[in-house]
Image: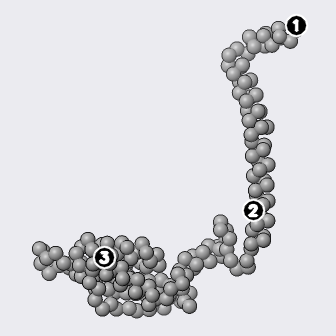
Amino acid sequence: MIIPGALRRMGDELGPAGQLAIVLLAAGAFFLFFELKPLEARNEQLDQQLARSARRDAVPGRARPGDTTPAAKVADFYRFFETGEQAPAQLNRIYSIGKEAGVELRAADYRMRPTGTPIERYEIVLPVTGGYAQIRAFLKKALAEIPVLALDQVNFKRARADDPLVQADVRLTLYLMRP
């Protein structure tokens, strides 16, 4: 038996480190052929399937998810402002959120500022009276529920230091797409 003797002699010459290296090479080859190659083939199939699906679902002028071209990014940006609601409906939501939070909303000042873009910008100056926590809760909920609303400035005033009510002038900006 020449082969077992040759293997034993080769094992003795390699030592433990060499034997471990051969075992690791064999394990790597096993992993490559029985795990990695099938995964690569499956990945290629999925890429082809995705490409077919994208061609089938493609609509001119509309960005696909994951599209990173500048035009697609701009289209996604403008799509964010398409809420489907006009300014009066959004303002009603702001007032209803204020009532839920327990703050008193007085007559507000609304101005539409031209932007030169497809986005309309409504500046809202809203005098509010209530507890500090109530005003914070109102602002937090309004900004969470109306993602196209931005808080620009808040000024708090108290008549006296021990007065529980706070008067605040809230400046908000509502961004909407032009109809």
Q: Closer to the camera: disc 2 or disc 3?
A: 3
* Residue that label 2 marks: 50
Q: Is residue 93 above or below residue 16?
A: below
Q: Residues within 10 Å of mark 3 (few under 14, many from 20)?
A: many
Depth check: give the residue in front, 92 or 165: 92
- Inspect the image, locate mark 3, and give the three-letter code of the amino acid beneath it: Ala
Residue at horizontal 78%, vertical 53%? 44
Q: Residues within 10 Å of mark 1 (few under 14, many from 20)?
A: few
> With 14 as the anchor, is 143 left or right in this view?
left
Residue at horizontal 23%, vertical 79%? 130
Residue at horizontal 21%, vertical 78%? 166
Q: Residue furthest front?
A: 100
Question: Where is residue 173, by image quadrant?
Answer: bottom left
Q: Percent from the top left, x then y, of residue 145?
A: 43, 75
Depth check: give the residue in front, 76 or 164: 164
Depth check: give the residue in front, 88 or 153: 88
Q: Percent from the top left, x then y, of residue 85?
A: 50, 85
The secondary structure type at the circle numbered 3 is helix
- Where does the N terminus fall, quadrant-wise? top right
- Total number of numbered discs in the rendering: 3
- Inspect the image, locate mark 1, and give the three-letter code of the amino acid beneath it: Met
* Residue that label 1 marks: 1
The earlier-in-sequence mark between 2 and 3 is 2
* Residue that label 3 marks: 101
- Inspect the image, locate mark 2, and give the three-letter code of the amino acid beneath it: Leu
The secondary structure type at the circle numbered 2 is helix
Q: Percent from the top left, x then y, of residue 57?
A: 74, 72
The secondary structure type at the circle numbered 1 is loop
Whether residue 155 is visible to the viewer of this picture, yes or no, is no
Question: Where is residue 91, by image quadrant?
Answer: bottom left
